[in-house]
Image (cartoon, rainbow, N blue to C red):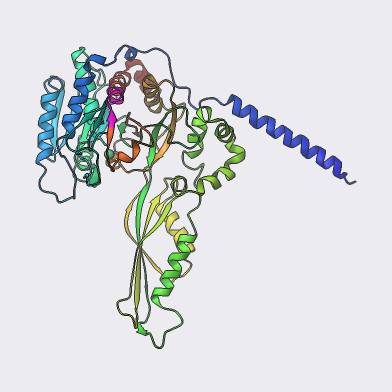
């Protein structure tokens, strides 16, 4: 028996209407992916005083005047790092004189503090930041190393990368010590001195030191993401506290071909240069597969759905249906495209030396930023297939694997601890997991714990974000107060005896 067309249309119509109703209902009722605790806690009562904000800002500005610039790895003159050490010692007398706090110089220029808690049953944690900054050669409206405070804004190289965290952590600790704070839980503060040069001499040695001492860390909190205002697709009304749970890897490949050289008057059908050029063009044309849903992307957009603008709220709440469409949208722009797949960039192409000689070899360099859901083998297999020519040799020049994805979600107490604290400072914010586009010192702590998180509590927006490694890096005095308040509450929350005792019992 065959169904009439009208019946088919009726059935389809009912199905479609049903789908529309379901998706709208979902968009209207979608809840936070993780229920962060907004219940009162001890740290609610701790807040820096408005009357002291001027002094905080002046101290941050003063730290920006010390030119701890990372130029290159064999840099000999690091005298400014010693100046910064002295400045920290002078600025935070209680931190540097308390009997339960020790400070060590690691590899001369990096700093490691240990704040000993009274309960050795509790696992220690680590707060990380870095002392160095990138050079400032662009066109600034003020001198990048004058530490200018103008119209309530602190300007200078390092204002949001990363001296706000160095100073913010120590301000918070000094404040707490003044209030008589005696931690139960031991924690460390690590300030590397060459993060901008991959941290090989600083954080790497700190990591080794802790490893040799058998320090079993609960978690590490470092830089990598911020409170993002108007920077996340579809979210314009609420800042997003993005917690980095991983970072992309770095892969550098050399592609090469070798074929007989010859005279240009009698060219062969194929040459080393032509074969490589074709291979490179194929590689560029065949992007790596989308990893959307294999990393935290799905959860990230689901997390921000309740805070998104109406159209995006509808879209993000129904990714189960719209994911293929959304992946296409993300793929349209380089910035959003790199977000959900391994990125491919051809950065160098070399061949030939004379206008009438066919070169016998050609070489190209490819720079991949590897998505955490892919392995080196995955990337190489894709590239080999995409290039599609055995004559193109592929050699790995440098590989830094993507960072493992740290646990997050409703059940993960440390993720909640960071989210809870972020919401104490910004109750209207969304909290979401993300993959940090930048690399951090955390790769040097990967053997110490599986729980590595990236969040530094400054607010950035489309106007201030370009200051990061760019011109006019800055942070408002008001927002700097929030940075200190975040660390203040975070140290208290992380010290919460019962929360972590409960955790130990479960293990
Ligand atoms: Zn940094």
x, y percentage for residue 281? 45, 65
Q: Report the residue at 32% width, 17% height from top.
A: 496
Q: Is residue 163 left or right of residue 458?
A: left
Q: Is residue 446 visible?
A: no
Q: Is residue 222 left or right of residue 13?
A: left
Q: Tell which residue pokes out farthest to the bottom in this image.
A: 266
Q: Report the residue at 43% width, 73% height from top.
A: 275
Judging depth in this view, the residue of 183 and 418 nearest the camera is 418
Q: Tell which residue pokes out farthest to the right in this image.
A: 1
x, y percentage for residue 429? 43, 25
Q: Report the residue at 36% width, 21% height from top.
A: 425
x, y percentage for residue 140? 24, 41
Magenta: main secondary structure: helix
**Quadrant in the picture for residue 215:** top left
Image quadrant occupied by the C terminus: top left
Q: How many numbered circles are shown?
A: 0
Range covered by the magenta-colored residues: 475-484
Q: Looking at the picture, does residue 283 appear above or below residue 225? A: below
Q: Is residue 477 magenta?
A: yes
**Quadrant in the picture for residue 471:** top left
Q: Looking at the picture, does residue 51 appear above or below residue 316? A: above
**Quadrant of picture, ligand 1:** top left
Q: Is residue 269 magenta?
A: no
Q: Looking at the picture, does residue 27 appear above or below residue 136? A: above
Judging depth in this view, the residue of 216 and 372 nearest the camera is 372
Q: Looking at the picture, does residue 221 appear above or below residue 43? A: below
Judging depth in this view, the residue of 474 and 396 nearest the camera is 474
């Amino acid at each position: 028996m065959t169904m009439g067309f009208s019946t088919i249309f009726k059935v389809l119509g009912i199905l479609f209407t049903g789908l529309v109703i379901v998706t709208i209902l979902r968009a209207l009722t979608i809840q936070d992916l993780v229920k962060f605790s907004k219940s009162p806690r001890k740290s609610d009562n701790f807040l820096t005083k408005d009357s002291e904000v001027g002094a905080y800002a002046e101290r941050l500005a003063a730290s920006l005047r010390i030119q701890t610039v990372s130029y290159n790895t064999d840099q000999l003159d690091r005298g400014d790092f010693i100046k910064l050490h002295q400045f920290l010692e002078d600025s935070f007398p209680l931190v540097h004189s308390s009997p339960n706090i020790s400070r060590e110089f690691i590899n001369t220029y990096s700093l490691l503090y240990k704040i000993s808690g009274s309960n050795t049953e509790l696992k220690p944690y680590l707060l990380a930041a870095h002392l160095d900054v990138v050079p400032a050669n662009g066109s600034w409206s003020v001198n990048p190393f004058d530490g200018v405070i103008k119209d309530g804004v602190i300007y200078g190289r390092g204002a949001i990368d990363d001296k706000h965290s160095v100073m913010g952590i120590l301000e918070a600790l000094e404040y707490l010590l003044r209030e008589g704070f005696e931690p139960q839980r031991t924690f460390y503060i690590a300030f590397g001195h060459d993060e901008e040069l991959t941290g090989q001499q600083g954080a790497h040695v700190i990591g080794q030191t802790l490893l040799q001492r058998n320090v079993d860390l609960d978690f590490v909190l470092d830089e990598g993401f911020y409170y993002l205002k108007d920077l996340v697709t579809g979210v314009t009304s609420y800042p997003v506290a993005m917690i980095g749970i991983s970072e992309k890897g770095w892969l550098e490949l050399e592609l090469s071909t070798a074929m007989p050289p010859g005279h240009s008057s009698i060219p062969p059908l194929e040459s080393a240069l032509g074969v490589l050029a074709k291979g490179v063009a194929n590689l560029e044309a065949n992007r790596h597969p989308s990893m959307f849903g294999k990393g935290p992307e799905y959860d990230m957009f689901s997390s921000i759905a309740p805070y998104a603008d109406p159209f995006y709220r509808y879209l993000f709440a129904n990714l189960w249906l719209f994911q293929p469409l959304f992946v296409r949208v993300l793929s349209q722009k380089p910035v959003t495209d790199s977000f959900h797949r391994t990125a491919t960039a051809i950065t160098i192409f070399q061949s030939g030396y004379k206008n009438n000689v066919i070169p016998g070899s050609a070489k190209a360099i490819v720079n991949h930023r590897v998505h955490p859901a892919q392995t080196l083998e995955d990337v190489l297999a894709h590239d080999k297939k995409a290039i599609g020519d055995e004559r193109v040799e592929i050699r790995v020049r440098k590989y830094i694997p993507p960072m493992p994805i740290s646990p997050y979600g409703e059940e993960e107490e440390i993720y909640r601890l960071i989210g809870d604290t972020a919401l104490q400072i910004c109750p209207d914010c969304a909290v979401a997991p993300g993959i940090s586009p930048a690399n951090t010192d955390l790769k040097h702590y990967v053997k110490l714990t599986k729980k590595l998180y990236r969040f530094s509590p400054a607010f950035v927006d489309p106007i201030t974000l370009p200051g990061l490694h760019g011109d006019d890096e800055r942070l408002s005095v008001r927002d700097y107060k929030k940075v200190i308040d975040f660390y203040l509450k975070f140290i208290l929350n992380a010290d919460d005896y019962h929360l972590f005792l409960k955790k130990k019992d479960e293990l």
